[in-house]
Image (spheres, coloured by chain):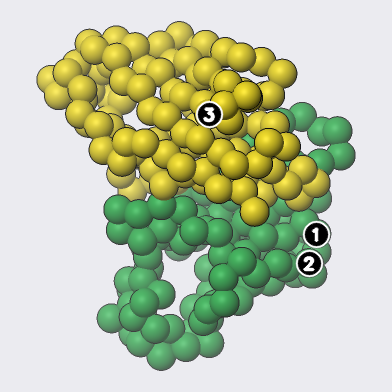
Chain colours: A green, B yellow
Amino acid sequence: SQTIHQWPATLVQPVGSPLSLECTVEGTSNPNLYWYRQAAGRGLQLLFYSVGIGQISSEVPQNLSASRPQDRQFILSSKKLLLSDSGFYLCAWSFGYSGRQGYGYTFGSGTRLTVV
Amino acid sequence: GENVEQHPSTLSVQEGDSAVIKCTYSDSASNYFPWYKQELGKGPQLIIDIRSNVGEKKDQRIAVTLNKTAKHFSLHITETQPEDSAVYFCASLSNFGNEKLTFGTGTRLTIIP
């Protein structure tokens, strides 16, 4: 079976510091990968998605970047955090379209980032 | 691009009563509609989904209906229980190929004991 791991669970970082959040998927190959942000009490904002190694699509211009150095690894980064970067960050994966089963996303457990 | 609207944003229901959450979508090519439940501090979890060749799907106390002509779909929870309290998100898949879901804005469901 497939599993998704996301860490850390919580993070408190000062303004201007760098950020690195990591997400890995096990039990499948060539998944589509996604980073979402959720502000308190708000909906899901898609930040980045990737359909393959080195392939990153950005949905919203911002202070963040994403990378996919390996097939099942997705990293969210920032060189200098802003207060507005605070939020709940979620990684998700899905089967890419190739006739494989299912179309839904499976989300990780999330990282709560507080920028102080 | 696809636009998904979800109503209501908040819903309070007496325990044991039914809850209905409705979503509309804009892209007539959308063909997959999942529902997610998000408990406090956790990631959303898929609870039920429906594909465009089906009008209704049930799983115990949860059901989803789809009206492709009107471009809307609904989540029905019967015999609600306190553990149903959560935020629910609908979504639609319109960009077949990279599986990019468009999410609704969420409904905060509160079950009143």
Residue B104 vs A23, above or below: the answer is above
Amino acid at circle 2? Gln
Report whether A84 appears left or right of B25: left
x 36%, y 71%: residue? A86
Q: Which residue is mark 2?
A: A55
Say which residue appears at 41% left-offset and 52% top-offset.
Answer: A43
Mark 2–mark 3 distance (CA, rounded to whole Å): 33 Å
Mark 1 lies on a secondary structure that is strand
SS at badge 3: strand
Residue B72, label in figure: 3
Q: Position of residue B110 (x, y in %)?
A: 22, 31
Q: Position of residue A1 (x, y in %)?
A: 68, 32
Question: Dot 3, how many residues are within 10 Å of its Cα: few (below 14), some (14-19), or many (20+)?
Answer: some
Q: Residue reaching furthest right?
A: A98
Disc 3 sits on a residue from what chain?
Answer: B
Q: Residue at x 34, y 12 (%)?
A: B78
Label 3 amino acid?
Answer: His
* Picture quadrant of residue A84: bottom left
Q: How far is mark 1 from mark 3, CA to CA?
A: 32 Å
